[in-house]
Image (cartoon, rainbow, N blue to C red):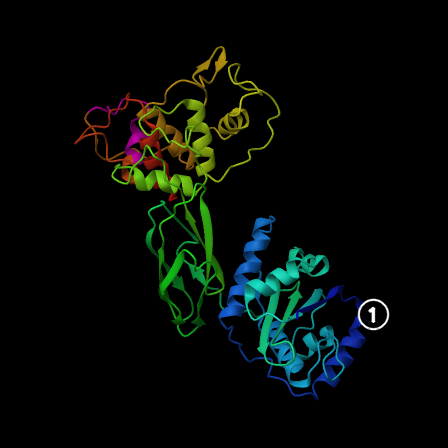
């Protein structure tokens, strides 16, 4: 049996201050933790924070919710109160509504506030789904006006587990923020192992929750203070990429795994790179389930690949047509236009304005395109010349040197870059994975 209920947002206006003040004075008579007490989130509470912030990011809310100490103390107290006194309601056994309770725990600011409660599920994922599938609860979770939350889970009572989620629009004292060295990792279909560094306070407790144990195995992680999470990813036999998540110290970490292509065996030197490109959705192959690693990359393919590697999967609708040879009917149209708007390409001809979409991409062109996509339009002057076949007088010279300095390329042979050679699809996978850390 599961239950959920919510209290809608309320913004306290001048008329509420007397009520809040009275609630504060009256509330001080009740037993509750001191306002300054710093709560500890258990593994599922941390997992819920990660799920909620990942959800809000997906709908376009870039700034993550922080965990308010006061709101969390209020939430934890209320969940425990529901267990202890056998009820399921926003009004606690003293008769206080959520806003009075928040006030009593030190969150009495004139700002937006709301509360969700749920019962019946012990896990963060199941409780999150309860609220997400309820329009009114979901509205609270999706509201950009909220900047902090409190989260509390208690075990026991008629429903087994009780959850309270409180929301606030003012950022007060918050729990220390946990940061990860990265929030995603990609793997080929062969799988493998990975790790992520966790930066937290010196004695801050943190935990790891694996949401996809069917193919992800957490090998180590959790404890007090900074640490490392290690994990393993099982081989993938499917025909579509898959994604799993781990909540690490309240932050969602995504594991992406690509598919295998019959023309890219595990012995192929670029197998891992091509698999990672597949995992990120940058490529769907060349048709017929193949990747065509030895085929040359065309300029329009390159525009699509680079844009997707940058995270642009749906470029804005162009206001016009820049190049005479890239009509609006081409699949690559919006990608090429965005490529041009970003200043990554000027086309292959200015009079007339052409892009040459089916033309091959050379290695020197690839260096220029990728460095510009990384925001480098004026590379520094190199101290030395790394490749004997790239003269310091060449336009691409500084771009290629920057390409090399970042470890994106090692050249085509010892001391050589082969600037006019065409880039194959396999080579492109290597360049993009290294350049954009895919």
| Residue 283 % position (x, y) | 43, 35
In depth, the one of 14 and 325 nearer the eye is 325
Identify which residue is drawn at 79% across, 66% down. 13
Question: Pointer 1: what residue?
Answer: 15
The answer to which quarter of the image holds residue 112 is bottom right
Q: In which quarter of the image is the N terminus?
A: bottom right
| Residue 378 % position (x, y) | 38, 32
Task: Examine the rendering and report whether any part of residue 344 can be seen.
Answer: no
Question: Is label 1 in a helix, a strand or a loop?
Answer: helix
Name the side, left or right, on which 42 lies relative to 158.
Answer: left
Name the side, left or right, on which 247 lies relative to 122.
Answer: left
Q: Quadrant of the C terminus?
A: top left
- Which segment did they paint magenta? 389-403
| Residue 210 % position (x, y) | 45, 62
Identify which residue is drawn at 35% across, 32% down. 428
- How many dots with numbers? 1
Residue farthest to the left? 414
Residue farthest to the right? 15
| Residue 277 % position (x, y) | 39, 39
The answer to which quarter of the image holds residue 274 is top left
Residue 97 vertical placement versus 405 (above, below): below
Mark 1 residue crowding within 10 angstroms, few (<14) / some (14–19) / many (20+) = few
């Amino acid at each position: 049996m599961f239950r959920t209920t919510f209290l809608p947002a309320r913004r306290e206006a001048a008329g509420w201050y007397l009520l809040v003040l009275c609630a504060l004075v009256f509330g001080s008579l009740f037993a509750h933790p001191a306002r300054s007490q710093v709560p500890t989130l258990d593994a599922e509470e941390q997992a819920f924070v990660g799920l909620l912030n990942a959800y809000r990011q997906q709908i376009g809310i870039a700034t993550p919710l922080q965990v308010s100490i006061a709101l969390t103390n209020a939430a934890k107290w209320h969940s425990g109160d529901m267990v202890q006194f056998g009820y399921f309601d926003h009004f606690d056994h003293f008769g206080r509504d959520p806003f009075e309770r928040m006030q009593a725990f030190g969150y009495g600011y004139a700002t937006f506030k709301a509360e969700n409660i749920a019962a019946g599920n012990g896990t963060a994922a199941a409780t999150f789904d309860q609220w997400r599938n309820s329009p009114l609860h979901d509205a609270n979770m999706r509201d950009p006006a909220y900047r902090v939350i409190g989260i509390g889970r208690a075990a026991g009572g008629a429903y087994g587990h009780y959850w309270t989620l409180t929301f606030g629009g003012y950022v007060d004292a918050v729990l220390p923020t946990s940061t990860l060295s990265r929030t995603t990792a990609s793997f080929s279909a062969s799988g493998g192992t990975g790790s992520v560094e966790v930066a937290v306070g010196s004695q801050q407790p943190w935990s790891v929750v694996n949401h996809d144990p069917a193919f992800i195995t957490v090998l180590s992680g959790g404890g007090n203070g900074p640490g490392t999470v290690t994990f393993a990813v099982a081989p993938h036999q499917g025909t579509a990429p898959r994604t799993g998540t781990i909540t690490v110290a309240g932050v969602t970490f995504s594991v992406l795994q690509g598919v295998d292509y019959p023309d890219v065996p595990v012995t192929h030197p670029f197998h891992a790179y091509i698999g990672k490109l597949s995992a990120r959705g940058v490529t769907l192959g060349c048709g017929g389930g193949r990747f065509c690693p030895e085929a040359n990359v065309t300029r329009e393919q390159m525009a699509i690949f680079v844009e997707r590697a940058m995270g642009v999967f749906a470029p804005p609708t162009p206001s016009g047509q820049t190049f005479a040879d890239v009509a609006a009917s081409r699949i690559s149209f919006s990608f090429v236009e965005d490529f041009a708007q970003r200043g990554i390409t000027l086309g292959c001809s200015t009079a007339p304005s052409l892009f040459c979409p089916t033309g091959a991409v050379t290695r020197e062109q690839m260096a220029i395109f990728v460095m510009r996509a990384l925001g480098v339009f004026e590379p520094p002057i190199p101290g030395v010349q790394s490749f004997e076949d790239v003269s310091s007088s060449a336009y691409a010279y500084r771009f290629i040197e920057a390409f090399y300095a970042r470890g994106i390329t090692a050249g085509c042979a010892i001391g050589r870059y082969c600037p006019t050679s065409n880039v194959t699809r396999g080579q492109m996978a290597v360049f993009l994975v290294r350049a954009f850390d895919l």
